Image: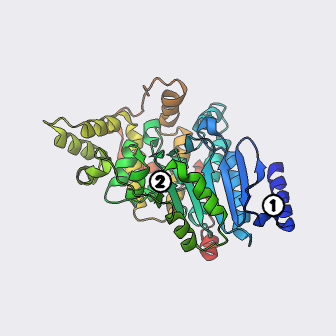
Amino acid sequence: MLGFRKLQLEFACCALKGRALSSVPLTLYEDRELKVEGTGFTRKAILNRPKSLNAFTTLMVSQLHRLYQAWEDHPDVGVVVLKGAGDRAFCSGGDIVRIYELAKEGNMRKCKDFFNKAYRFMYLVGTYAKPHVALLDGVTMGGGAGISVPGTFRVVTDKTVFATPEVQIGFHPDAGASFFLSHLPGYLGEYLGLTGERLNGAEMLVAGLATHFSVSTRIELIEERMGLLVTEDPSVVKTALDEYSDVAVPDAKSSLRRMDAIDRCFSKETVEEIICALETEAAGISDAWYANTIRKLKEASPLSLKIALKSIREGRFQSLDQCLVREYRITCRKLSKKFSHDFYEGIRARMIDKDSSPKWHPPCLEQVSREIVDKHFLPLGLDGLELELPVKQREAYI
């Protein structure tokens, strides 16, 4: 909190002295996790944990939420830019290893508080009244997509790597993923959510997850261009970004060239039917795409697969806020171990011990009942407080 007050003071001093109109970037605030720069009418927030692929913490999303609210109300701020420090990642998502540690300590309140604050910030990004430009130069996974994809503009590069791999750690596609995945062409969202398959920048643009594609070496030029804008008109920002856009064409091995197969197989009603359809089509042929897709489905948590499919299917008919509320319910059930320990077992196997041999419970799809899946979606009731989002306030604001 002290750092935020310092930032507010520096912000006010810059404005009073006329320095806020300078074309030279000013560092308004910097700590171990977040850095803020100001240039003219542009404010840039930089996720400052490059060694952790800029995975965000509770403190980071809390600071960002306060900053974004202040900038949205400030007449001298027109454009907000979000990027990651270093040259490897925009944001790999939330710091789930820290969540794992908190849970082992028995501090469930802090675990839930992390997701509560993160989802609230994601909703703010998705309803932001001013142009929001996310520079996705590098790894963009899980929550990293959650704090960027709902925003106005997403610039991807030849270094971008996108994925929603939550089912591989016994979790579920959260951070608004059930909303933006469900609105992708055909059944691409089901494919990405159930397999955790990666997309590159060109594929993200073609799929509609990104608004602009540029080579990584031009990111600094884009940042400079954003800093010269004196506007909060999205069309003006789009025109400026268009100046640095390149043509993006998925390569011959891209999953997007398999959309016919994806739609045929991932449109099935159940996970079992999806796998059956893939195996039927793969029978008698040697095709690496089918083999890789089937392998990923069989490596994932069976319970998470069924939850993910139901969540994405519901997302097709819901708004962002409704998806976040539902995802928070599922998350709280995952944290509680009430029905399964898969979330913690997945983190242990993939990120702690790294033996890549999680012991899922239930161990197979056949043992995952519809009843246990449905219970993850019920109102929290005695399991905790619901996620409260300022829907009416935000709708009136924008």
Q: CA separation, marks 2 and 1?
A: 34 Å
- Residue 43 visible to the viewer: yes
Q: Secondary structure at mark 2?
A: helix
Label 1 sits on what residue type? Phe
> Across the whole image, how many numbered discs are drawn on residues?
2
Q: Nearer the viewer, residue 347 or 141?
A: 141
Q: Quarter-wise, where is residue 55 in the image?
A: top right
Residue drawn at the location 64% of the way across and 65% of the way down: 79
**Label ID, residue 330:** none
Q: Amino acid at mark 2?
A: Ala
Picture coordinates of residue 320, whole percent (x, y): 51, 63
The mark found on residue 11 in the picture is: 1
Among numbered discs 2 and 1, the one appearing first in the sequence: 1
Figure quadrant of residue 312:
bottom left
Along the horizontal axis of the image, is 254 left or right of 321? left
Q: Which residue is mark 2?
A: 177
Residue 168 location in percent, x, y?
Answer: 43, 37
Residue that appears at 27% across and 51% down: 257
Foreground: disc 2 or disc 1 = 1
- In the image, residue 87 lies at what x, y percent? 58, 41
Identify the residue at image location x=31%, y=51%: 256
Image height of 252 relative to 125, above or below: above
